[in-house]
């Protein structure tokens, strides 16, 4: 009598021999069916992948545009900062200059009023000088007003740049 294991081994060998020609005929058909099924499943995935690829490319373009805008804003900010520093430097010098001019003006006014009271010969000349000084004083005040307006404009620009960069 044949043992159980020997019988199983013989059955396996006979199945392999008998199945081999069948498998050779069935295998290409099964592979064709598998490829078609894979294409059917892969088609929506390919469409999703193409859509995502386009989104990523769109994001890259947006990032590049934002990077360029950031660089432009950074340049504007540094330019505004440089101008503000220059302005602050000149603004620090202004009070001293205005004080010196006002001191000179008061000295000239005092001298002119003394000369006018004394009835000196140069009262007409001192009045002309005094008028010229007053005119120059008005010009200086106008310049200071322009400087104040410029400072206000720079402040608005800095706020605008800060708002843009915080977005």
Image: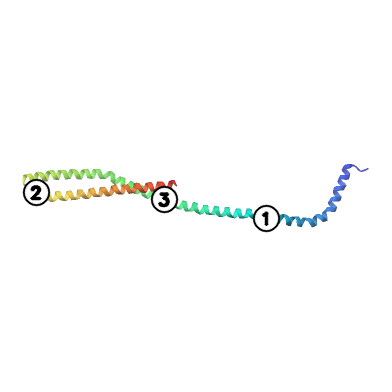
In screen coordinates, is 133 left or right of 93?
A: left
- Tag 3, which secondary structure? helix
Label 2 Cα crowd, 10 Å radius (few <14 / some 14-19 / many 20+): some
Residue at 87% from the left image edge and 48% from the top image edge: 11
Residue 78's x, y, as percent?
Answer: 38, 48
**Which label belongs to residue 91?**
none
Task: Assess whether mark 1 and mark 2 are in contact (beta carbons under 8 angstroms).
Answer: no
* Left or right, residue 160 beside residue 91: right
Q: What numbered label is drawn on residue 73?
A: 3
> Residue at image x 26%, y 48%?
145
Asked whether residue 86 appears in the rendered view, the answer is no
State the separation of the CA atoms marked 3 and 1: 50 Å
Within 10 Å of disc 1 (Cα), the crowding (few <14, some 14-19, many 20+) is few
Q: Is 116 on the left or on the right of 51, as rendered?
A: left
Q: Nearer the viewer, mark 3 or mark 1?
A: 1
Rendered image: mark on residue 123 = 2
Q: Residues within 10 Å of mark 3 (few under 14, many from 20)?
A: some
Q: Position of residue 133 (x, y in %)?
A: 17, 49
Tell me what residue is drawn at x 43 percent, y 47 percent. Answer: 165
Q: Earlier in the sequence, mark 2 or mark 1?
A: 1
| Number of the front mark, 2 or 1 | 1
The disc placed on residue 40 is 1
Q: Kindly check if marks 2 and 3 are in contact, taking CB atoms under 8 A apart as contact.
A: no
Measured Cα–Cα span from mark 2 to mark 3: 59 Å
N-terminal label among 2 and 3: 3
Q: Could you tell me how far apart the alpha carbons at marks 2 and 1 are, in whole angstroms?
A: 108 Å
Q: Position of residue 104 (x, y in %)?
A: 17, 44
Q: In the structure shown, which secondary structural element does the residue marked by tag 1 occupy? A: helix
- The residue under the point 9% across, 50% down is 124
Residue 72 appearing in the image: yes
């Amino acid at each position: 009598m044949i043992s159980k294991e020997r019988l199983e081994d013989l059955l396996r060998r006979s199945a392999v021999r008998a199945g081999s020609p069948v498998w050779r005929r069935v295998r290409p058909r099964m592979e064709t069916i598998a490829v078609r099924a894979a294409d059917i499943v892969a088609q929506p995935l390919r469409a999703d992948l193409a859509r995502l690829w386009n989104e990523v490319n769109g994001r890259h373009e947006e990032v590049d545009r934002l990077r360029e805008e950031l660089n432009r804003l950074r340049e504007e900010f540094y330019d505004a900062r440089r101008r503000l520093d220059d302005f602050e430097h000149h603004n620090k010098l202004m009070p001293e200059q205005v004080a010196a001019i006002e001191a000179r003006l008061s000295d000239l006014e005092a001298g002119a009023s003394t000369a006018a009271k004394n009835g000196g010969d140069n009262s007409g000349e001192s009045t002309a000088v005094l008028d010229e000084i007053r005119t120059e004083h008005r010009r200086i005040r106008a310049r200071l007003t322009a400087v104040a307006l410029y400072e206000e404009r720079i402040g608005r620009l800095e706020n605008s740049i800060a708002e843009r960069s915080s977005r």
